Amino acid sequence: MNSTDSEPIVRVREVKKDKVNFVLENVDLARVVMADIPTVAIDLVEFEANTSVLPDEYIAHRLGQIPLISTNCDEAIRYTRDCTCLSQCSYCAVQLRLDVACNDDTTMEVTSNHLEVVPLDDYMQEEIQHGEEKAKRTQWFGHPVGKNEPGTPPVLICKIRKGQELRVKCIAKKGIAKEHAKWSPCSAVSFEYDPYNKLRHTSYWYESDIQAEWPLSENAQEEEPPRDDEPFDFNAKPNKFYLEIETDGSLAPQDVVEKGLNELQAKLANLILGLKEPTDEDMGGGGAGGPMPAWGAPAAAPAESTWGTAGSSWPGGSSPGRGGATSAYSSSPGTGGSGWGGGAASGWGSPERQVGSWTA
Ligand SMILES: [Zn+2]
């Protein structure tokens, strides 16, 4: 392997609105774009009225998975755990409302087109917040993807009949797919390497003619076909990957690739930093502030746990038929260790249902 073999190379072959196809050499990108690119998604749901046939938690779960426009999510919104507010404010959250009632004899479909972005009531918090995040948002930041866009069918949330209604307040937050898959900007990531199977990482089952039964993919045009007399190189390693990344529309595929590469670079820089011998100066702090870099910092425990215990975070909210308590739902299940649903102290995701808080 010579030095040029290890330089990362990206060559884009096709770009569409929601899809990008490219060849990548010497980099492993697929994991990063699937798990580490932040987007916004509905995370907290408060039901003011739900007389549909679906239970609250079912609808909360569906709302969480609606893709929301997250352009420039890195800079346009902060994680609530990095914010100084108590549970949500306009710097770390986007509020959406769903307010529909059916008065006809025909069944009504409640879809993502009914979700309206409304300014967040910041109460007293606005004064103490400072930041440029809001200036960096695009006009449609936080709106459902494809809302009222001709040719893009909306996401169905539920169906209601005459006399039924749905009044819901949703808080969308920034997150990554390591915490919950709803935050993944990717709907499909596919990749192939070694189209001729020169490395023999797989063996094809075939009936009579392997070449007829296993046609070559178009990626084979990118590589030299093996000669019949070519000896097997058992030291060879794959270094050229053919990728296709499809997004749900929350981010453009080009942005996903670009941010994925940045993320990978940052991870490697952190690793290198972590491998360095700690100096005396680094050790000075001792204890928790040790020399190790904040590996995987985004997974640190979020500070939202105050939310679940306080149904009163939503003043004035009431949920008829739910024991009178405000029923607030988190649409992310407690993924281990991330702080959500971690300790019993936090209402979210703890096994006991407190003040109507659920994980869906
Ligand atoms: Zn905030």
Image (cartoon, rainbow, N blue to C red):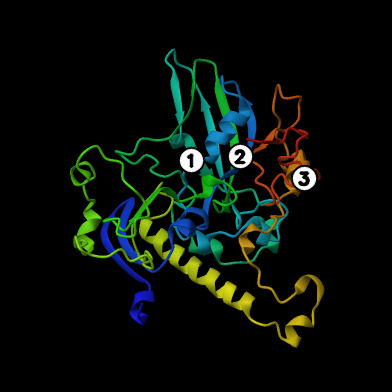
Frontmost residue, 270 versus 238: 238
Please state if 113 lies on the left or on the right of 194 as rendered.
Answer: right
Graded by Cα atoms within 10 Å as few (under 14), some (14 to 19) or many (20 or more), the crowding at tag 2 reads many
Q: Amino acid at mark 3?
A: Ser
Q: Quadrant of residue 58?
A: top right
Frontmost residue, 85 versus 227: 227
Q: Is residue 136 above or below residue 336?
A: below
Q: Are marks 1 and 3 in contact (CB under 8 Å)?
A: no
Residue hosting label 3: 346
Name the residue located 34 percent from the left edge and 41 percent from the top edge: 149
Between discs 3 and 2, the one toward the N terminus: 2
Outermost residue, top direction?
Answer: 105
Please give the label number shown on residue 66. Answer: 1
Gap between marks 2 and 1 measured at Cα: 11 Å
Gap between marks 1 and 3 measured at Cα: 26 Å
Between discs 2 and 1, the one toward the N terminus: 1
Q: Amino acid at mark 1?
A: Ile
Q: Secondary structure at mark 2?
A: loop
Q: Is residue 248 above or below residue 283?
A: above
Ligand 1 closer than 8 Å to label 2 CB: no
Frontmost residue, 94 versus 176: 176
Graded by Cα atoms within 10 Å as few (under 14), some (14 to 19) or many (20 or more), the crowding at tag 3 reads many
Q: Is residue 349 visible?
A: yes
Please state if 281 lies on the left or on the right of 219 as rendered.
Answer: right
